[in-house]
């Protein structure tokens, strides 16, 4: 399906991945979904009460929208695990990496992928490409692989292979890198003091090497004043970082998505509506609005009104929507239909598999340290 065959209001919707406020589709949420036809939905712990309810919520979201949905979750393992309380805790990246085993790296992706697929998801915003640098250790904790980009590539390549084998699409994040950030972008806008040579040869190496393997790249709300002089503009709103460096210099062909526009890091630089327009003008294909449905609507309206007013901006919206639709129609995992809601036996199997994998990681990491 070509984006041009959709009405403009649905082309705009394709550029948004939205959060839901609660664990069910309220009448207001239903109206929002059917009005805008979002590109995707993302669920958090607040939306998930049980495996069956989670799968049902995703199925009802898809039923409300005529185009295929990206049904998204953040599940890296460790501190970022929305399913730990309803299935089982997935091991943290740092613990998996401590095993030094490519087989375990791939299994991490596959076991997580099988779990999220069984609950109705088709996109996992993982793995993290950020380097494990001293500045960000208190912020990123066990989410990172190594200070060595080659080790990040080694883990990420295997993790993505495992995810893909389970029918799940992955995402490299947070471009161009949060390893040097001493502030949390959820709350503040960090200025990362790494120069261009460091960023190009280290932070960006995973994006350069894995550009054809990762269907999504998520862009960070952070500034890099020693690398690019941009007067307080975060990478997520920067044409230099997205259009020139990620698209042209690196040659990334997939979907570029801005991190959540409700985060303090981007709101320090622009209003939410301005950020929605600016990230698209900078070269993003999509953006996340994760918390409040009112904010989803405000961003949607801002983009739609600008597209109705400005033909050039409308053409940009159509090109981005085309890339989104192309991924949805050509990626094997995304073409698969919704799975049936898991029963108790399915959930027990998933729980046992994850618990056995966590025990295996513990044994292998202890053996590697011995």
Image (cartoon, rainbow, N blue to C red):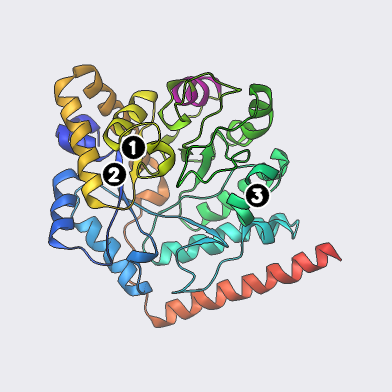
Between disc 1 and disc 2, the foreground one is 2
Q: Residue at x 64, y 26 (%)?
A: 200
CB atoms of marks 1 and 2 within 8 Å: yes
In-image side of 83 versus 104 (left or right): left
* 200 in the magenta segment: no
Which of marks 2 and 1 precedes in the sequence? 2
- Which residue occupies the foreground of this view, 171 or 265? 265
Query: Which residue is tagged 1?
Result: 324
Residue 240 seen: yes
Q: SS for tag 1? A: helix
* Magenta span of residues: 241-249
Q: SS for tag 2? A: loop
Main SS of the magenta part reads helix
Q: Where residue 260 appears, x then y in whole percent?
A: 38, 44
Residue 257 seen: no
Q: Where residue 6 appears, x then y in whole percent?
A: 17, 35
Query: Which residue is tagged 3?
Result: 137
Mark number, residue 39: 2
Q: Where residue 55 appears, x then y in whole percent?
A: 33, 67
CA gap between label 1 and label 2 equals: 8 Å
Which of marks 3 and 2 precedes in the sequence? 2
When the figure is inspected, residue 3 is found, relative to residue 122, above or below; the finding is above
Q: Where residue 26 appears, x then y in whole percent?
A: 17, 63
CA gap between label 2 and label 3 equals: 33 Å
Figure quadrant of the C terminus = bottom right
Q: Residue at x 70, y 56 (%)?
A: 97
Q: Quadrant of residue 59?
A: bottom left
* Residue density around tag 1, few if under 14, some if 14–19, many if 20 or more, within 10 Å: many
Figure quadrant of the N terminus = top left
In-image side of 273 versus 88 (left or right): left
């Amino acid at each position: 399906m070509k984006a041009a065959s959709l009405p403009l209001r649905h082309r705009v919707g394709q550029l948004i991945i939205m959060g839901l406020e609660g664990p069910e589709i309220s009448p207001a949420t239903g109206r929002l979904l059917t009005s805008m036809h979002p590109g995707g939905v993302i669920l958090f712990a607040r939306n998930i009460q049980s495996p069956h309810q989670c799968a049902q919520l995703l199925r009802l979201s898809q039923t409300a929208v005529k185009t295929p949905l990206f049904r998204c979750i953040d599940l890296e393992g460790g501190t970022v695990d929305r399913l730990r309380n309803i299935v089982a805790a997935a091991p943290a990246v740092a613990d998996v990496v401590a095993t030094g085993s490519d087989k375990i790296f791939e299994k991490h992706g596959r076991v997580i992928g099988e779990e999220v697929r069984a609950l109705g998801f088709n996109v996992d915003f993982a793995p993290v490409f950020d380097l494990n640098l001293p500045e960000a250790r208190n912020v990123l904790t066990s989410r990172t692989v190594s200070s060595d980009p080659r080790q990040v590539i080694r883990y990420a390549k295997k993790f993505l292979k495992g995810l893909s084998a389970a029918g799940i699409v992955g995402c490299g994040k947070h471009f161009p890198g949060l390893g040097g950030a001493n502030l949390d972008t959820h709350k503040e806008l960090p200025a990362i003091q790494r120069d261009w040579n460091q960023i190009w040869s280290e932070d960006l190496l995973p994006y350069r090497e894995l550009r054809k393997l990762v269907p999504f790249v998520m862009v960070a709300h952070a500034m890099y004043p020693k690398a690019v002089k941009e007067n307080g503009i975060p990478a997520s709103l920067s044409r230099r970082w997205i259009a020139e460096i990620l698209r042209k210099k690196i040659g990334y062909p997939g979907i570029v998505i801005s991190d959540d526009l409700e985060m303090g890091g981007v709101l320090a630089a622009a209003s939410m509506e301005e950020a929605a327009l600016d990230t698209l003008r900078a070269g993003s294909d999509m953006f996340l609005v994760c918390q409040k449905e009112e904010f989803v609507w405000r961003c949607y309206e801002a983009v739609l009104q600008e597209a109705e007013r400005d033909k050039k901006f409308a053409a940009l919206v159509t090109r981005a929507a085309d890339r989104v639709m192309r991924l949805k129609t050509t990626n094997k995992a995304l073409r698969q239909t919704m799975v049936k809601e898991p029963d108790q036996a399915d959930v027990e199997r998933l729980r046992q598999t994850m618990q056995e994998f966590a025990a295996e990681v513990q044994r292998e990491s202890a053996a590697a340290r011995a």
